[in-house]
Structures are given as C-alpha cells and as structure tokens.
Image: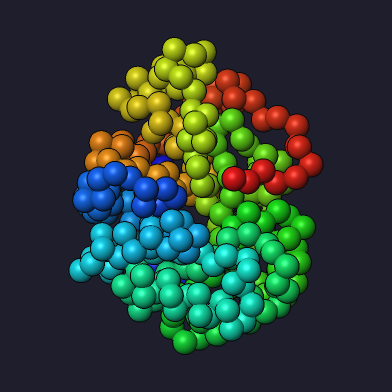
Amino acid sequence: MQSYFSLDSAAFSRVGQGSWYLDSAADRAQVIRAIQTGLDAGLTHIDTAEMYGDGDAETLLGEALRDRRDEAFLVSKVLPFNAGYDDAIAACERSLQRLQTDYLDSYLLHWRGQVPLEETVAAMEQLQQSGKIRSWGVSNFDVSDLVALYAIAGEGKIACNQVLYHLEERTIEHELIGWCVAHGINVVAYSPFGHDQFPLEGSAEGQVLAQIGQQYDASARQVALAFLCRRPDVFAIPKAASMRHVLDNAGALDLTLSQDDIANIDAAFPLQPHPGYLPMI
C-alpha cells in the first residue's frame, strides 16, 4: 500500500486519524498521547470538524499538535448552516483558533445543505487565496451533488469527498468512486470499521480477515483498511483513542493485499445492490 499521496503539494498518509467522539473520551491525556503516537508512526492525515463535540475535538487536536503542526495534514469541516460566504469564513476562523493554527491543509463542507453551493465555493476560494486553507473539498456528496458542485467550481478545485465506507457498506463502489477518480477527486473513507459493525473474530467473515492477516502477520483491522484503500485514490481515517489501536491502524500503511486476498474479501463482504441514496452517519 502506498503510504503517502500528494494533495496540493502536501503529503498525507493513506491511513489517517479521525476524531469523531474523541472529545468524549474519559482520559483526555491518553487521547493526546495516542494522536501524537500516530504522528510518530506516520499517520499524518488528521481529520476533525466543528461539529465534533461542538468544537471540543478541534480544541483537543490543537493541544495534541502544539509544536507539531508542521507534521500533520490537518482537515476540518464546516457545517451546512455555516456554509454561506460570510458564515463559512467566520466558521473557519473559529476552527483555526480552536486548533491553534494559522491554516488548514483542507477544509470540507460537511454535507450539502440549503445554502447555495456558489456561496460556499466563493468562501472556499477566498479562504484559499488568503492562505487560511490550502485546499477544499466536501463530505457526504453523492454523484448528483458533485456534478452540481463541479459545474460551479470547475476542474482541479475539489480536493476530496469524504464518505461512509467500510466492509459492510460499499455503496460508493457502484458509481461514486469511479466518478471521483475520473474528475481528480480523492475519496476519504470515514468510519472504515463501521459503526459497531466490524465482524466478530469468530464469525465466518472475521475468519476470512484473520486467515488473510496470518499471511502478513497483520490484524483483521489492518486487512480491512488495506482492502478499503486498495485503490490509489482512496484513503481512510479510522478513529483511535488508545496507543494500541493507533499503532494497529498504522500497521496498515505498508500492507498490500494480493488479488486473491481481495477476491476472498469481496466474496465474504459482497457488494449489495445500490440502495438508491448515499448512506451516511
């Protein structure tokens, strides 16, 4: 698995660190150590949002990245009701303050709301021109949303689309990944282990992952991450609140599965018919 990919002249890890619910962890100091351990292990792609803990996740990351900001590819997201021109610029400033940084490597619209996309694009372009952000993208956008956005923004402007993607939820493989790749948009998988849906060790599906992992001295979760990131334009941001979990995630950076491995996982977790909408949580 390729460990780093260039986005807007900045390197970030194919497997990163998510922060949804990190702010609610009982041991805040442990979480900060886990984030820093992840940086040490090469998990430089760090994702957050103003929504997470009403900004407290950003505050926590600001503490974790103090004196280490230049080691991270830092991403945050603006809520749809803050996506108007003036509101988005103000929201970005608040995020920057909580994160204790002068810039974001990428800034995303969390999901499409009622604000006209033209306003959001104008705000993103202004933030980029002023050096507050280095790139921008979206989250939870289906193909129809991306078509509308692309018509406004134009070629080479949308850095990524962050979407739900895990072994039990592969809807984006029907059309979305292909559309994004064709238009130069990276895909970032959130909740790559599912939301309490990762296969149990004793299940038939869990045994497939374990057997594949034995070939590489890898864990089932490392195998899952390697499968999700098997395409060069797909990345993943699993959350980890402990050093043990973050180091396990980092072990997937250098794991490349064979075509037989991929076929076996594909058979164990078959692609289901398209539900007619883009799943999100």
Judging depth in this view, the residue of 65 and 91 nearest the camera is: 91
**Colouring method of the image:** rainbow
**In screen coordinates, is 167 left or right of 153?**
left
Residue visible at 75% across and 37% down? 274
Q: In this view, does 199 lie above or below 8?
A: above
**In screen coordinates, is 51 left or right of 102?**
right
Judging depth in this view, the residue of 25 and 32 nearest the camera is: 25
Q: In this view, does 3 lie above or below 98?
A: above
- Residue 251 quadrant: top left
**In screen coordinates, is 135 left or right of 149?**
left
Judging depth in this view, the residue of 260 and 8 nearest the camera is: 8
Residue visible at 42% across and 44% down? 238
Residue 16 seen in render: no
Q: Is residue 38 above or below residue 115?
A: above
Q: x and y percent of residue 91 in the render?
A: 50, 75
Q: x and y percent of residue 154 in the render?
A: 68, 74
Q: x and y percent of residue 130 in the render?
A: 47, 87
**In screen coordinates, is 101 left or right of 198?**
left
Q: x and y percent of residue 225 in the render?
A: 45, 37
- Quadrant containing the N terminus is top left
Q: How many labels does the image show?
A: 0
- Quadrant containing the C terminus is top right
Residue visible at 57% across and 41% down? 165
Residue 53 seen in render: yes
